[in-house]
Amino acid sequence: MATFHVIAGATETLEHTGVRKIGVSDLFDALRRGIDDFLVKPSHIVFLFMIYPIMGVVLAAWTSGANALPMLFPLVSGFALIGPFAALGLYEISRRRELGMDTSWRHAFDIRHSPALPSIAAVGIMLFVIFVGWLLTAQAFYEYLFGSQPPASISGFLDQIFATGHGWTLIIVGHAIGLVFALVVLCTTVIAFPLLLDRDVGAYEAIHTSVRAVLANPFVMLVWGLMVAVGLMLGSIPLFAGLAVVLPVFGHATWHLYRKLIEPLPSPSHQPRR
């Protein structure tokens, strides 16, 4: 990196990126292309994302005690909030495959050489802050309903959740709160990281472009968010092992979604980073 820049891009000016309207059919085409990337380079996916089911099992074991049990769902569902950052290596593999370049697994870590790395880190920190905010909010809401005293046992916790009015309030309102956090992440980062890998436009423009893409395609992007949510739910069964497939597929698909949403720069000024 010749210069350290975060908010603006390499030109130290805010560049406005063109956004296109897309249809629901484009979502399924992006997903199909993501599946194709996954099938062509599955070894990369196992290497990069086997950590997710392992983390899920560890979290389940850690929260098997009554003290931390109420935080199990917020922790697991929080995967969706940090997923856009965790999929950086997959965007890079899809980018290289698109350009006909070498897609050996080691190139998934080439992002460390990206000139936009400070901007990528800044958006990643933002996601981590949102993730922590979600955990703190979930804990505070649980304690508001049930107090700070932890459940005496797992069976007692389940009865507390499913057999009481406060429990159903936690389920319904808690999911609504989680939806707000998920929508914030969707709006601000749905294509922010792929854009930064492709063009060094700066953190502000990457986030701003993601927001504009969602506002230009509100229904389509809500469908995309629902597809990701359903995929994560199915991938969590059994024991989160399905996430080793679901997460990489959606990671690759996000790159292709980015290509559909963002207008290419006019040639010859658009020189993809190699």
Image (spheres, rainbow, N blue to C red):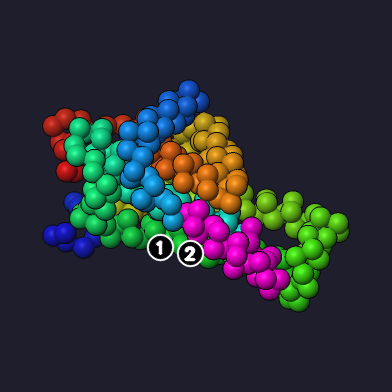
Residue 209 place in picture, x, y as percent: 38, 43
Instruction: State which quarter of the image contains the C terminus.
Output: top left
Q: Amino acid at mark 1?
A: Ile
Residue 133 place in picture, x, y as percent: 55, 64
- Relative side of 93 to 125, left or right: left
Report the magenta stretch's main SS: helix
Instruction: State which quarter of the image contains the N terminus.
Output: bottom left
- Relative side of 134 to 26, left or right: right
Asked whether 152 or 89 is in front, the reply is 152
Residue 223 place in picture, x, y as percent: 55, 33
Residue 154 place in picture, x, y as percent: 75, 65
Tell me, yes or no, whether the two marked residues, 1 and 2, touch with CB atoms within 8 Å. yes
Residue occupying the point 78% across, 60% down: 158
Q: Which mark is residue 125?
A: 1
Q: Amino acid at mark 2?
A: Val
Label 2, on which residue? 129
Residue 92 can be seen in this image = yes
- Relative side of 150 to 46, left or right: right
Residue 195 can be seen in this image = no
Residue occupying the point 60% across, 61% down: 60
Residue occupying the point 54% across, 57% down: 56
**Residue 219 drawn above or below residue 190:** above
Q: Which residues are magenta?
A: 52-73
Q: Residues within 10 Å of mark 1 (few under 14, many from 20)?
A: some
